[in-house]
Every structure is written in structure tokens, then in C-alpha cells.
């Protein structure tokens, strides 16, 4: 049995796959939302790119938090290998709740950003519709891609002495 060396061990963490694909799928979304925020279209190019990348990194943290919420609920860190509708719904709802809270905090409390007049908002929350749609549409795709990638990584490392007992599951 071969041993997985430390530099590659992180590939066996299901969280890594969720963070990776949450970030990658949110980057284009963030760029597409630029006209919906005041001042974004007139920012210097590199400043706007940095803002979008920072937002996508924040989305990755939200995705990681949502993953951990499901893991705590399921009492199983590796739930990504086999998940169903319930896990997906809890993941999406967690992301939505965090997003609504952060958007409200940023637009009402700290005034960190402002929606452009073209951004549709929910009247009772004042939250932009696009961030909500983002966390309704992308998470199921994120989970599906992350799961496939995670399972594929485990299969490639089959026979390796890896943590969490994954060799017993796939071996």
C-alpha cells in the first residue's frame, strides 16, 4: 500500500473540492454582476478585478461554512461522496442565510457597497436579487462537480494510505 505524502494529502479533504469549485464557479458570476453595483463599472480595471476575486473568495468561505453545517448535521465530514436532496437543500439554505446577512450588513450597516438602480431588490429585505439567485443556482452545480471531482481523486489515489478511512470505502 502506497502512502500519500503530505503535500498531496489535502486532495483527500472533501472541503478542498467544495472551496475550489465554489470559487471557480463564482468568479464569472461576480464579473457579470459588475453593472449592478454603484461605481464598479467606473473603477480602474485592476481594482474591479481584485474586488470580484475578493467577492469570489468570500463566496468560497460561504461554501465552506455551508459544507461544515451539513457535515455537523450529518455527523459525517465525507458526506460529499454520497449526498441527496436534503443535504443539497441545507447547503443552499445555509449559503442563502449567510448571503442575506452579509448583503444586509454591507449595504445597510457598513455601507461597503451600494446597489445600482438596475439591481432588483427584495422589498422586505432590501437584498439584491442577483446575490440570492447566485446562491440558489450555483450550489447544486457546485456540489455535483465537487462530488465528481472528489470521487475521482479518491479513485486515482486508490490503495493509498489516506485519512478518514477512504481507502476502506473505495478499496
Image (tube, rainbow, N blue to C red):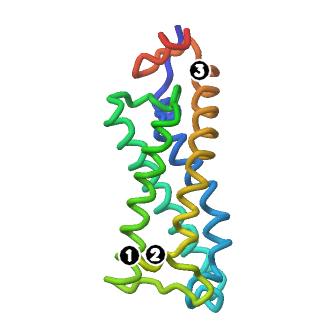
Evaluate if marks 1 and 2 touch, with contact meaning CB atoms under 8 Å apart: yes
- What is the x, y in percent for residue 117? 58, 90
Please give the label number shown on residue 157: 3
Find the distance from the CA under tag 3 to the CA under tag 2: 44 Å
Q: Earlier in the sequence, mark 1 or mark 2?
A: 1
**Of 46 and 71, which appears nearest the observer?**
71
**Of 23 and 135, which appears nearest the observer?**
135
For image coordinates 56% across by 84% down, the residue present is 37
> Which mark is nearer the camera, 3 or 2?
2
Q: Give the image quarter of residue 48.
A: bottom right
Find the distance from the CA under tag 1 to the CA under tag 2: 6 Å
Give neighbour class at mark 2: few <14, some 14-19, many 20+ (Cα, 10 Å).
many
- What is the x, y in percent for residue 164? 40, 21
For image coordinates 36% across by 68% down, the residue present is 101
Q: Which residue is mark 1?
A: 104
What secondary structure is found at the residue carrying circle 1?
helix
Q: Is residue 41 above or below residue 74?
A: below
Q: How many marks?
A: 3
Q: Earlier in the sequence, mark 1 or mark 3?
A: 1
What secondary structure is found at the residue carrying circle 3?
loop
Q: Which residue is mark 2?
A: 127
Amino acid at each position: 500500500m502506497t502512502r500519500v505524502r503530505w503535500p498531496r494529502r489535502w486532495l483527500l479533504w472533501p472541503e478542498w473540492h467544495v472551496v475550489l469549485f465554489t470559487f471557480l464557479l463564482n468568479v464569472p458570476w461576480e464579473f457579470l454582476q459588475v453593472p449592478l453595483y454603484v461605481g464598479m463599472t467606473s473603477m480602474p480595471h485592476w481594482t474591479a478585478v481584485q474586488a470580484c476575486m475578493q467577492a469570489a473568495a468570500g463566496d468560497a468561505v460561504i461554501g465552506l461554512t455551508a459544507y461544515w453545517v451539513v457535515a455537523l448535521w450529518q455527523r459525517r465530514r465525507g458526506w460529499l461522496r454520497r449526498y441527496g436532496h436534503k443535504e443539497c437543500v441545507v447547503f443552499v439554505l445555509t449559503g442563502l442565510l449567510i448571503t442575506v446577512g452579509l448583503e444586509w450588513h454591507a449595504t445597510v450597516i457598513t455601507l461597503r457597497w451600494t446597489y445600482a438602480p438596475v439591481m432588483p431588490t427584495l422589498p422586505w429585505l432590501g437584498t439584491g436579487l442577483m446575490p440570492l439567485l447566485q446562491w440558489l443556482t450555483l450550489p447544486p452545480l457546485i456540489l455535483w462537480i465537487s462530488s465528481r471531482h472528489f470521487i475521482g481523486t479518491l479513485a486515482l489515489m486508490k490503495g493509498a494510505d489516506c485519512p478518514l478511512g477512504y481507502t476502506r470505502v473505495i478499496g
